[in-house]
Amino acid sequence: MRIIVRTDGDLIVEATPDVGYVHRGCEKIAESRNIIKNIPMLERPNIADSSHLNWSYIQPIEELQGVEVPERGRYIRTILCEINRIASHLYGMAIMAGIFSGHTTMYMFGFGDRELLLDLAEMLTGARMTFSFFVPGGVRRDLPKDFKEKLLETVDYLERRLVAIDRIFVNNPVFVERGRGVGILRKEDAIKLGVVGPVLRASGVRCDVRKDAPYGAYDKVDFEIPTFKEGDSLSRWLVRFEEIKQSISILRQAIRDIPKGPIARKSPIVIPRGEAISRIESSRGEINHYIVGNGSDKPYRVKMNTGSFKNLLALPFLLRGVRIGDLPIVYGGLDYWPVEADR
Amino acid sequence: MERVVGSAPLKHLVNWSRIYSLWPVHLMTACCGAELGAMMSGRYDPERFGMQAAVGSMRQSDLLIIEGTVTKKMLKRVKVVWEQMPNPKYAIAMGDCACSGGLFHDSYSIVNELEKAIPIDVFVPGCPPRPEALLNAVIKLREKIRREEVYPK
Amino acid sequence: MTATLSTQEQRIATAVKEQLGSAVEDVRVDRKGRMSLVARNETITEVAACLQRLGFDHTIAVSGVDYLTEKRIEVVYFLSSYSRDDLKHLVLSLKAQLDREKPSLPTLTPIWESANLFEREAHEMFGVNFEGHPNLQKLLLQDNWDGPPPMRKDLTFPELA
């Protein structure tokens, strides 16, 4: 994506984002393919967070078909989504504190620790990033034999690494001063612009779809929603850092309490007449899929709205009055994923 | 001068230096960029080949890794980046979408045949290709550079 | 999913019917957390202002649907609330039926600023004209796109075998 900036000396007067460089027409292609064949294509827009997109596409189809996922399937979905959330947050933190502020250390930390989570996901699903693991009715495979030990080992290691990141970045004035007070978004503006995800929670609005409208196994685990009041770029980074800790807690509870039973129920390969909308909290915000069915095996209309597209409106708003040197920090704090916004 | 430099052993020296300092341009087009980012990190370590992750600008790089789908809107910018790179330059097409359109081949807004716009040296299939596959492609490119002439006719 | 409907949805449905009367049709509550209503095009700004007073402070998506055989384009605004705790779980779909030949609707950006980019996308994908929108230019398509709006059902693809 491109940002066209007009400046007055060092201060930005007006910024216009120019998007659409990765617009591949996912919604149009989805109308001409079978619902199962759409799954790999519709999870590509955000490859680092693909299980949330998969779930958000499947949820309205299950609602229209009237299929209820069994308990064990819901727990497995939650486990995979939380693994994905930690991996995606490490990616976002690595880009902002690593590339955009000039410290390659966080880039190497983030990507190196992410590899362990991708190994876990590969053990469960067979793929590093593009899982295609959820189908209408449940999940494809059960947990492998030694998955629980590997998961607990990875999670213990991650907790020790978070202490190191805390010491090197969160308590380090070189990094903190770059983000503190830069690109402030107040609570009223955040609600008016309709931003989502960590950007919203960094501005003081305590909203998370996992708590407001629970799905999967989220109503059976205990977790908190980290919220900060300042609304600057540093708080947006810190929200992601705290959310990783909450995800680790969810993973421990889920793998301890997962019940035995079937992992999927049979579902027909047609979408009955009707329309439904899904709400899933992905790592960049709330995503929605609106599906209209007409009784055939191809959806009549698939509309995707992703977190990055909703946050795009905040970018020109935040950049007004900011210095040119702070542009990467404001952009990195939003954690904008262009492919997800353009679909 | 050309006769001196173009003959062995100076030719081997020139090619050796080109192989061990392939600096890539960061042109993240689409989803394969996540695997490119993973390849540039500690586990797969391209720095042992001299591929530096943080490059200043495209005028100082000699490798263009086109990863992901190239849309019609993006094609003009990819060509501009390619023309700004100084010779000798190489291009790797990473992912199914850059090779032939991939999953989105019937879309109204993408370019299916990229090799008509930019000469490509190595194609890497996969959706997305594993970082090991991309490293394998870099090794094949190095073998190709090792064999080529310093001043091509 | 329970058989009895929640009180929040019923309360909103009653308030909407009382305050708007004939400006809305077909107010229905599908299940806990999902409601929909159809507004008449002339009075859609009034309906939107009333919904904002009831507590819906942002749009989560705007979608167009092209019903080719019924010769209409439907524009759906999905609304939710951040500031009211009792409405956080609810998604209300505000629908408007437009004529397929010349689809046109007053913009709702003065009421919900979050609908700005969503309406722009619906304009370039379906050809819907939002009267009064501050900036109705191309967002996602390439600069020299000269074909029909791509999401309409007239533009078809060769299907996979």
Image (cartoon, rainbow, N blue to C red):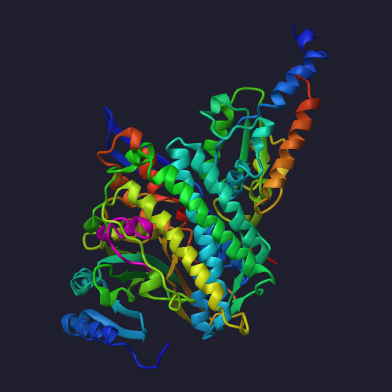
Please determine whether, in this image, residue C135 is positioned above or below residue A127: above
The residue positioned farthest toward the bottom in the image shown: C3
Can residue C89 be spotted in the picture? yes
Q: Position of residue C100 (x, y in %)?
A: 39, 68
Front-most of residues A82 and C99: A82
Please determine whether, in this image, residue C33 is positioned above or below residue A314: below
Labels in figure, total: 0
Q: Quadrant of residue A147?
A: bottom right
The residue positioned farthest toward the right in the image shown: B8
Residue A69 magenta: no
Please determine whether, in this image, residue A336 is positioned above or below residue B20: below
Left/right of residue A303 with respect to residue B91 in the rendered view: left
Q: What residue sits 27% from the left and 43% below the top?
A: A181
Q: What residue sits 52% from the left and 66% below the top?
A: A81
Q: Quadrant of residue A32?
A: bottom right
Q: Position of residue C105 (x, y in %)?
A: 29, 65
Front-most of residues A280 and C106: A280
Q: What residue sits 47% from the left and 54% below the top?
A: A89
Residue A202 magenta: yes
From the image, which quarter does the N terminus of chain A lie in?
top left
Q: Position of residue A317 (x, y in %)?
A: 28, 47
Can residue C146 be spotted in the picture? no
* Span highlighted in magenta in the image: A191-208
